[in-house]
Image (cartoon, rainbow, N blue to C red):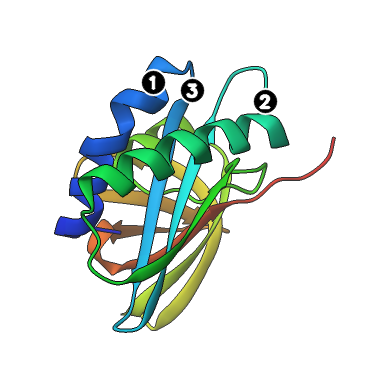
Amino acid sequence: MKADGTTQTLKSLIAPQIERMGYELWGLVCQLGVRQGRVCVYIDHPDGISHADCAAVSDQVSGLLGVADPIRTAYRLEVSSPGLDRLLLCPEHFQRYRESQVSIRLRWPLEGRRRLFGTIEAANGNAVEIREDEQTFVVPYNVIAQARLHYEEE
């Protein structure tokens, strides 16, 4: 879950513009390879996100990246809503969704487990506590490969 230098550079470049447009930069996922890459920008708004919102942000971000040129390989830019089953990308996301269900895929086994599905009990700057059945796991953020909010219709 720790952001690399490119991700941090991109966030600092695009976040102010996204916020000026009235959206929250939910997160940024960079998957850059030698020949081709992908930059996924997730935006959020209390009223939801439409296709037109994504297109407007995509135009602005594309322009910013075209001028600043911070990525030295070919890439595809994607702008999307984080959705109902949103990725949790930073400690603040875990704190915001305390007492919510989450599924977590781990980079390496933790207490013999590679996946967890449970409730977020607590989160701080270093780790998140996940209650699964009657057991609580303290999961450092650097062990998390991917965490996703579990959405159930009421």
Residue type, numbered disc 2: Gly
Query: Which percent across, then down, holds residue 4?
Result: 19, 60
Is 40 left or right of 32, judged from the image as shown?
right
Q: Would residue 94 be seen by someone viewing this image from the given angle? A: no
Disc 3/disc 1 C-alpha distance (Å): 5 Å
Number of labelled discs?
3
Q: Which residue is mark 2?
A: 48
Element carrying mark 3: loop
Q: Which mark is residue 23?
A: 3
Mark 2 or 1, which is nearer the eye? 1
- Judged from the image, the secondary structure of the residue bearing numbered disc 2 is loop
Relative depth, front residue between 19 and 26 = 19
Q: Residues within 10 Å of mark 1 (few under 14, many from 20)?
A: few
Asked whether disc 2 touches disc 1, contact meaning CB atoms under 8 Å apart, the reply is no
In the rendered view, tell whether residue 60 sits above or below residue 83: above
Tell me, yes or no, if residue 60 can be seen here. Answer: yes
Do callouts 3 and 1 mark residues in contact (Cβ within 8 Å)?
A: yes
Looking at the image, which is closer to me, 151 or 30?
A: 30
Q: Earlier in the sequence, mark 2 or mark 1?
A: 1
Q: Kindly indicate the quadrant of the structure image that contains residue 11.
A: top left
Q: Which residue is mark 1?
A: 19
Q: With 34 as the anchor, is 27 left or right in this view?
A: right
Badge 2: residue crowd in 10 Å (few <14, some 14–19, many ≥20): few
